[in-house]
């Protein structure tokens, strides 16, 4: 049976990737791969992740492909690196695509702009204007430029007005400065803001959010803060207290400190171990005041823990979270969003995350994704922006 002869009532996913140099050649290469798997377009969804030198390259790659593979919803994000069905391409020009025929599924796309979300949302009706169709969805995929959109604020609105709706995706990572990233949703092409896709109907999404850090030392009570500075911990100057904790780390564990030190703030209730914390960067120290600077605003009376990056713990955590998938039916599609800080830099080898995920699923699943400057995903019933994690969505027909 050819792809065009497959029953129209069957959900089908396909993935493709290309590292060809010219936009026209890459578009032709991707279109050929998608047509081989899905038949002739149009498709219900085409989602692209594009890496390479400069925004112009990103935009140039998209236009020929949109003509060659038209879709009801066509979206793209620029990234530092991309994830394909079998590989993680961390440098150079690359495009990773996932496309689908989705009978019985509705995809509701909407643009995210900072001005729209600046005011506090005070009702479900206001939320529905900003995020049409999101409140009763099975899944929301969200992608944004980290320099122009307060995604923490948006996720806070989701947590209040759309409780239980899972938001997964990531922050564009192609450029380290404002104006350098690209987000595309159908005819809308921008270097700021973002977009979301709300899925309804005969689709089931399983979500995994896996940490890449391991807690060390005891919980520490935040006793005085000033903006992004933690001034005291356990009633002592924060820097002094942290140095005490580090001196007590067993000798055989100190090697891990060379990978860097991070702050974990509770994601839920009584956080106790790996996976219960949101990992935030430790930005520096003010030795005159004994304070530390953290890449988040942490409130007084929070109980934090120090964390270190740990490759073995990251693999173990991901494998454990994926174990139930071995007893499920084959997946249709797969989206993988690792942090920029994972990949070779953490594991020392290429393709570790995508290989771990694929090995947990029966067969080989169509897959795409990108390395993120912040990963989106739920912990418990609430959605967060994460660091040093891998956020994963496993898609099946309901």
Image (cartoon, rainbow, N blue to C red):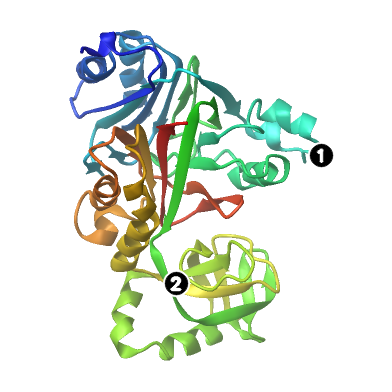
Camera-nearest residue between 265 and 396: 396
Instruction: Tell me whether circle 1 and circle 2 mark residues in contact (CB < 8 Å).
Output: no
Residue sitting at x 44%, y 72%: 307
Which mark identifies residue 262?
A: none
Q: Is residue 93 above or below residue 291?
A: above
27 in relation to 84, above or below:
above
Q: Could you say where residue 127 lies in the image, as x and y percent from the top left?
A: 73, 33
Percent x, y for residue 337? Answer: 39, 44
Question: Helix, strand or loop at disc 2?
Answer: strand
How much space separates mark 1 and mark 2, taking CA atoms? 36 Å
Q: Residue at x 29, y 67 (%)?
A: 312
Position above or below: 95 against 80? above
x and y, in percent, of residue 115 in the image: 69, 32
When the figure is inspected, residue 356 is found, relative to residue 11, above or below; the finding is: below
Q: Residue at x 72, y 38 (%)?
A: 118
Residue found at x 33% / y 31%:
50
Q: Find residue 25 and report its horizontal and vertical position in percent.
A: 19, 17
**Viewer-proximal residue, 226 or 128?**
128
- How many labels, in total? 2
Q: Secondary structure at mark 1?
A: loop
Is 130 displayed left or right of 307 in the figure?
right
> Could you tell me if residue 123 is visible in this image?
yes
Report the residue marked by disc 2: 307
Picture quadrant where residue 64 is located: top left
The quarter of the image holding the N terminus is top left
Q: For mark 1, does the 10 Å Cα neighbourhood hold few (<14), some (14 to 19), or many (20 or more) residues?
A: few
Q: Which residue is mark 1?
A: 122
Is residue 9 rendered to the left or right of residue 367?
A: right
Along the line of sight, the residue nearer the viewer: 188 or 377:
377
């Amino acid at each position: 049976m050819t792809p065009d002869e497959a029953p129209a009532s069957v959900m089908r996913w396909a993935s493709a990737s290309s590292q060809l140099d010219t936009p026209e050649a890459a578009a032709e290469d991707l279109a050929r791969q998608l047509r081989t798997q899905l038949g002739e377009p149009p498709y219900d969804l085409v989602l692209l992740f594009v890496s390479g030198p400069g925004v112009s390259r990103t935009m140039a790659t998209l236009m020929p492909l949109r003509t060659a593979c038209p879709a009801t919803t066509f979206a793209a994000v620029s990234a530092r690196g991309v994830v394909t069905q079998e590989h993680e391409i961390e440098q150079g020009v690359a495009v990773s695509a996932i496309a689908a025929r989705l009978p019985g599924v509705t995809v509701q796309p909407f643009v995210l702009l900072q001005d729209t979300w600046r005011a506090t949302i005070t009702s479900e009706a206001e939320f529905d204007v900003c995020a049409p169709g999101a409140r009763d969805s099975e899944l929301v995929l969200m992608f944004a430029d980290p320099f122009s959109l307060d995604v923490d604020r948006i996720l806070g609105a989701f947590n209040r007005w759309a409780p239980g709706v899972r938001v997964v995706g990531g922050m564009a990572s192609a450029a380290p400065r404002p104006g350098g990233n690209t987000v595309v949703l159908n005819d809308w092409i921008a270097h700021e803001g973002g977009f979301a896709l709300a899925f309804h109907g005969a689709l089931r999404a399983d979500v995994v959010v896996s940490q890449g850090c391991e807690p060390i030392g005891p919980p520490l009570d935040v006793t005085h803060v000033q903006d992004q500075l933690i001034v005291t911990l356990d009633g002592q100057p924060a820097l002094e207290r942290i140095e005490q904790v580090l001196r007590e780390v067993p000798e055989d564990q100190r090697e891990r400190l060379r990978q860097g030190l991070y702050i974990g703030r509770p994601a839920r209730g009584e956080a106790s171990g790996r996976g219960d914390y949101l990992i935030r960067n430790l930005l520096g120290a003010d030795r005159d005041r004994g304070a530390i600077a953290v890449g988040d605003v942490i409130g007084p009376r929070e109980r934090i823990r120090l964390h270190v990056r740990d490759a073995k713990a990251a693999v173990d955590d991901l494998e454990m979270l994926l174990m139930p998938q071995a007893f499920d039916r084959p997946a249709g599609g797969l989206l993988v969003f690792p942090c920029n800080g994972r990949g070779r830099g953490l594991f020392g080898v290429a393709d570790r995350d995508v290989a771990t995920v694929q090995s947990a699923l029966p067969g080989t699943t169509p897959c795409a994704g990108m390395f993120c400057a912040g990963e989106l995903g739920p912990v418990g019933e609430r959605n967060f922006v994460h660091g040093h994690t891998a956020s994963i969505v496993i898609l099946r027909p309901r």
